Image (tube, helix red, strand yellow):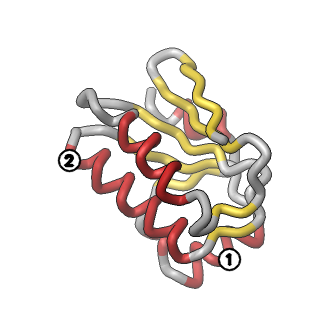
Amino acid sequence: MLKIERINDVTVVSFKGVNRFNALITEQVKEEMKALFSSPNTKLVLDLSGVQFIDSSGFGVFLSIMKTANNNYGYFKISNISEEVMELFKLLQLHNVFEIYNKRDDALKSFN
């Protein structure tokens, strides 16, 4: 479900075969992503390519992961959000909470 790769010192997480991030998969995703912040100063980019819908439990996971990252002096950034999903971020005023980048490369470069 999750594809995890390392690019230099940044962990990039993306979804494999998932276009809806909803209550059916949120708990598993949350546990896997929180585990990535087990060591301090982790840099993580969540690439949302292909995700067309996120429900409230999905946004709750993002907030939980950001809290975990902050508690471990880590960094959590999001990239490649579809227009439909970005509208939900804006509706919930979460575009002001998360660091969001149009492209994965821009998110990666932001760590330099």
Residue lying furthest top? 8
Image x and y of residue 98, in percent: 45, 60
Any part of residue 99 in sight: yes
User: Between marks 2 and 1, how big is the CA–CA gap?
Assistant: 28 Å
The answer to which image quadrant residue 38 occupies is top left
Of tags 2 and 1, which is closer to the observer?
2
What SS does tag 2 mark?
helix
Q: Residue 12: which disc?
A: none
* Residue at figure coordinates x 45%, y 61% from the top left: 61
Position of 46 with respect to 104 (left or right) is left
The correct choice, above or below, for 63 with respect to 78 in the image is below
- Name the residue located 45 percent from the left edge and 27 percent from the top edge: 112
Q: Residue at x 53, y 39 (%)?
A: 45
Q: Please determine whether, in this image, residue 65 is positioned above or below residue 93.
A: above
Based on the displayed image, in which of its 4 quarters is residue 111 positioned? top left
Q: Is residue 111 above or below residue 99?
A: above
Q: Is residue 72 above or below residue 66?
A: above
| Residue type indicated by callout 2 | Asn
Q: Pinpoint residue 42: horizontal percent, then vertical percent.
A: 35, 31
- Residue 9: % across, % down: 45, 19
Residue under label 2: 71
Name the amino acid, label 1: Glu
Location of residue 6 by image quarter: top right
Say what secondary structure mark 1 lies in.
Answer: helix
Where residue 7 appears, x then y in whole percent?
57, 19
> Label 2: few (<14), some or many (≥20) within 10 Å?
few
* Residue 95 shows up from this direction: no
Looking at the rendered image, the quarter that the N terminus falls into is top right
